[in-house]
Amino acid sequence: MKREITLREPKTGKALTLPVTPESYQVSTEMHLETVNIHGAGDAVFAGNGGLGSFSIAALLPARRYEFSRSGTPEPYIEQLKKWCREKAKLRYIVQGTKVNLPVMLEKVAYGEQDGSNDVYAELSLREYRPLKAVQVEKATQNKKRDSEPEKAPGESLYTAVYGDTLCSICRRFYGSDSPDTYNRLAAYNGKANPNLLMTGEVLKIPQPLP
């Protein structure tokens, strides 16, 4: 008994059954294996994750009615296959009467005429696909401390420098003095070798009082 082969798009329900059942079909299952040479023990084989199968279908798309054919017009089949390939459609590869029902994508559609009958011979390259699982990412909150934010000691506050800030202007704001002695002491407290260099976004510890 020959098996009908159908490609179905689950999203829309659009299905295409090959007009002529191929002489045979093949499905593969792969496993990635890695061979490692261990000193003193020789080669060892380690199994990785399961691979994705790839296979091809040789399809006959008749240009006229035959007793063994479901259709005598190849163009609609070619256009639908090309559309699925172009749009990277997720399909199901179904072999009727078997348990073969695989998620696949059309990797390549090659077709042409061979014998002057106007029948079209197509080669469909299919590749199994595996839906990717979404990775849950923890959302940042305003209450969560940034990794780059320094630890705050008792009596300290933190200040993030904005564009135009200098240690001189910051000292004037928090200590009421912009003398060199004041901003040099604040620079030393924050471990800054150069009191004249302040980057936008830099976080400073502001002690009260300034030691």
Image (cartoon, helix red, strand yellow):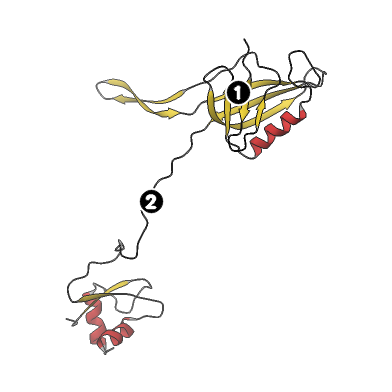
| Residue 157 % position (x, y) | 24, 75
Q: Residue 48: percent from the left, percent from the top?
A: 38, 29
Between 161 and 106, the residue placed more toward the observer is 106
Q: Position of residue 181 (x, y in %)?
A: 23, 86
* Quarter of the C terminus within the rendering: bottom left
Q: Is residue 23 above or below residue 103?
A: above
> Residue 104, labelled with which disc?
none
Cα distance in 3D space between marks 1 and 2: 38 Å
Q: Are marks 1 and 2 in contact (CB under 8 Å)?
A: no
Q: Which mark is residue 56?
A: 1
Q: Which residue is mark 2?
A: 137
Left or right of 88 in this view: 129? left
Q: Tell which circle, 1 or 2, labels the residue nearer the N-terminal end.
A: 1
Under mark 1, the amino acid is Ser
40 sits left or right of 30 in the view: left
Helix, strand or loop for disc 2: loop
Element class at badge 1: strand
Residue at x-position 29% and y-position 66%: 149
20 relative position to 101: left or right: right
Q: Quadrant of residue 155?
A: bottom left
* Residue 44 occupies quadrant: top left
Q: Residues within 10 Å of mark 1 (few under 14, many from 20)?
A: some
Q: Nearer the viewer, residue 123 or 129?
A: 129
